[in-house]
Amino acid sequence: MSLILGILAQSGGAAVAASSYESISTVTVGGTAVSSISFTSIPATFTHLQIRGLINTSGATNPTYQFNSDTGSNYAGHHLWGTGTGAFANAQTPSTSTIYFNHNPSASFPSAFVMDILDYASTTKNKTTRILAGSDTNGGTAEIALWSGLWMISFAAISSVQLYGNGVNFTQYSSFALYGIKGA
Amino acid sequence: MAAGSTYTPIATTTLGSNQSSVTFNSFSGYTDLVLIFNGTITTGDDSWGVQFNSDTGSNYSSTALYGDGSSAGSNRTSSSTKASTSYSGTANSTTIINFQNYANSTTYKTALVRNNGGGFVSARVVLWRSTSAITSIVASPNTYQFATGSTFTLYGIAAA
């Protein structure tokens, strides 16, 4: 027996109340590829941020990110990933100037990511991120990964996020959407 | 400025009987979809996954990172007739599937999955080698059935 669900059977079970999750801004890359995109003037009115993306790149790359255009050696991170043939882990040692959030192994296949930026507006905590990201290429080089990130700079609130292709470009139809999640 | 509330529940069901598949076919107007499964499989441990737009061709693949309680590993499928998303059993399990930019008609479709079940914890990426917008999703176990009481909830996320 199979079950087909049409419109709209809201019977509870929602993990996130509709009023607590808001779209802030979206960037979709047009016909001209770009080396980076930015979200700026992020309002401090939410508790957490989430960036959801589907990326096309001009070549294999590990895209990176920064906060508030801080190019100092203030970032660190950890990386746990699978390639389809093995599981691995490594770290970006403290004091890197950018931090990875994804691996896109091929220009022919998109990669996806969901990045959570926790307590982004706090002025009393270092900022941490968690990321689920991956790209599958139908039997070729692939990666599914969990990333963590740390930004260590004087407890500054995050007001902008920069995402970089890291030596390659984000190509047409790449999309990045920023959302805010409210607290109680 | 924020453009408005989103992460909207589209459909929720709790299975009243064992089901060989569950279909979602009405979810236009969003940027991403999130499908949450919480439930069990009849009879025993089983892999399950999704097909899009009734495509039963060998157009799906996936890569998984998993832990089984004693070690970590990774495996993959290629040129499959279903996108493998999950491993579940007779004990309760959970799956969250993020369908990114599902309605675009220019790129292959990629989804990110977190799954706990059948003695494993895993993360997966799945690929559907089609540029068609996703208009229907069918979830089905490979061997057994989704068991009575299992719940599926589909959410839509609209970007600004």
Image: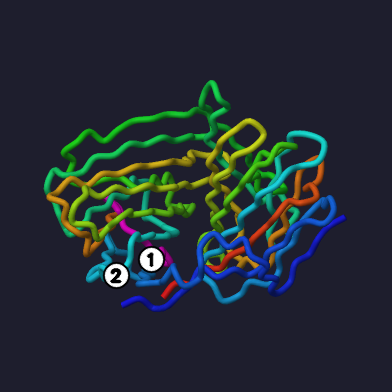
Figure check: A2 above or below B73: below
* Quadrant assignment, res B13: bottom right
For disc 2, the marked residue is A45
Label 1 with label 2: CB-CB less than 8 Å: yes
Q: Residues within 10 Å of mark 2 (few under 14, many from 20)?
A: few
The x and y percentages for residue A59 are 37, 50
Q: Residues within 10 Å of mark 1 (few under 14, many from 20)?
A: some
Q: Secondary structure at mark 2?
A: loop
Image-based side of B151 in relation to A129, left or right: right
Q: In front: B66, or B102? A: B66
For disc 1, the marked residue is A182
Q: Amino acid at mark 2?
A: Thr
Task: State the residue at coordinates (61%, 59%).
Answer: B130
Q: Is residue B10 in view from this perspective?
A: yes
Task: State the residue at coordinates (41%, 71%).
Answer: A22
Image-based side of A85 in relation to A93, left or right: right
Task: State the residue at coordinates (53%, 41%).
Answer: B123
Q: Amino acid at mark 1?
A: Lys
Q: Which mark is residue B60?
A: none
Q: Give a yes or no on whether discs 1 and 2 share a subunit.
A: yes
Magenta range is: A165-184
Task: State the residue at coordinates (33%, 45%).
Answer: A62
Colour mapping used in the image: rainbow
Q: Secondary structure at mark 1?
A: loop
